[in-house]
Image: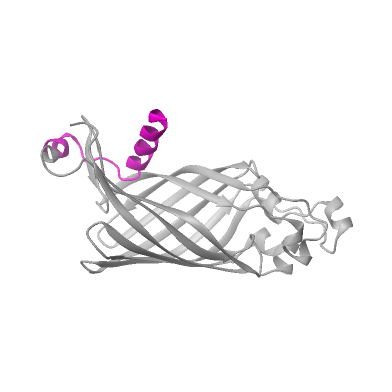
Amino acid sequence: MRLAVFATLIAAGASLGFTGAKAEDALVGGGPQYLIDVGIGAAVKPKYPGADSYIVVPYPLFGVGRFYIPGVGERESGARGFYLFPSFGYQAERNPNDDNSLKGTNKVPWTLELGLGAGVRGQWLNSFVTLRQGINGTDGQVGGLGVDVVLPVTPNFDVAFGPRASFASQDYMETYFGVTGKEASKGSLSKFKPDAGFKTVGLAASASYKLTERTKLRFTGSYNRFVGDADKSPIVKAGSRDQWMAGVGITYRLGFNLFR
C-alpha cells in the first residue's frame, strides 16, 4: 500500500518537472514539501462517444501544487519550462440498451486509459501532448494535443482556454466507432471499419476560484466535433457529431512532509 501511494506521488510529481539541487536547499525549513489538491466533482457529458443524450457522472479531482524529491529538488505548479505528467481517462460501459440506434451492437465494457503527457509552459501559453493505453474495454491507444492561453485574472481567480485535437489507434476506433457485419445484420446500422487517425477537434476551458487558502472551486467545459473516420461512423451519424461537456467541483489542499 505504501509503495502504491509513493508511486502515485512520484507520477504526480513528474507532472511538475524539477528545478534542480538549489531548489532543494531553498525549500529546507520553508513550508510543506508536498502540496496536493484532492476533491470531487460532477460533470454532464455524452452517454457514450457519439451519443446525442447526456448523463451526469461523478469524477475525482487531483492536482499538485508542490512536489519534492531529495537530491533532485522541488517544483511549484505553474512554473515555466518543460514538464511531464501522468494522463488518465475513463470511458463508461456502452450498452445496446443505451439508445435505440445501438440495437444489435455488442456491449463495450468500461475502459480505463493510462498514460503520460509532456508539455511546455511559458508566461501565457501552455502546450501539451498526451498518449494513453486502453485497459479492459479496448486494447487500443488514444491521445491528444492542446494549447492553452493561461490568464491569472485576479490573485484568486484564473482561467485557461484553447484548442484541442484527439487521435486514436485502429483498435480504439473499431471499438467505439466500428460496426461488424454481424452487428449490422442484427440492427439498423451499416457495416463500418474505421482506420486510425484523428477523431475530434474542439475547444476546452477551465477556471478555478480560491475560496480559502486551502479550498478552490474548479470549473471545466469543452466542445468537440468528430472528424475523419469517427465522423463517418454509423454510430455517430445516428447520434451526434457534436459533443459537449461541463463540470464543476471543489478541491482541498493537503500539505505534508515525507523527508523531514
Q: Percent from the top left, x then y, of residue 96?
A: 76, 57
Q: In which quarter of the image is residue 178?
A: bottom right
Q: Position of residue 78 (x, y in %)?
A: 27, 54
Please say whether residue 145 is one of the residues in the magenta stretch: no
Quadrant assignment, res 85: top left
Give the quadrant of residue 258.
top left
Q: Toward the viewer: 35 or 194?
A: 35
Out of 82 and 99, give the one closest to the viewer. Answer: 99
Give the answer, above or below, for where 13 lies relative to 179. Answer: above
Side (left or right) of 68 relative to 37: left
Choose between 181 and 154: the one closer to the eye: 154
Q: Is the magenta stretch mostly helix, strand or loop?
A: helix
Magenta span: 1-25
- Residue under the image location 27 percent in, 65 percent down: 211
Taking the magenta stretch, the answer to whether it contains residue 20 is yes
Residue drawn where x is 51% and y is 58% of the image: 58
| Image quadrant in which the N terminus is located | top left
Picture coordinates of residue 2 (x, y %)?
38, 29
Rendered position, 24 above or below 217: above
Identity of the residue drawn at 10% across and 39% down: 29
Looking at the image, residue 241 sits to the left or right of residue 84; the answer is: right
Between 104 and 205, the one nearer to me in the picture: 104
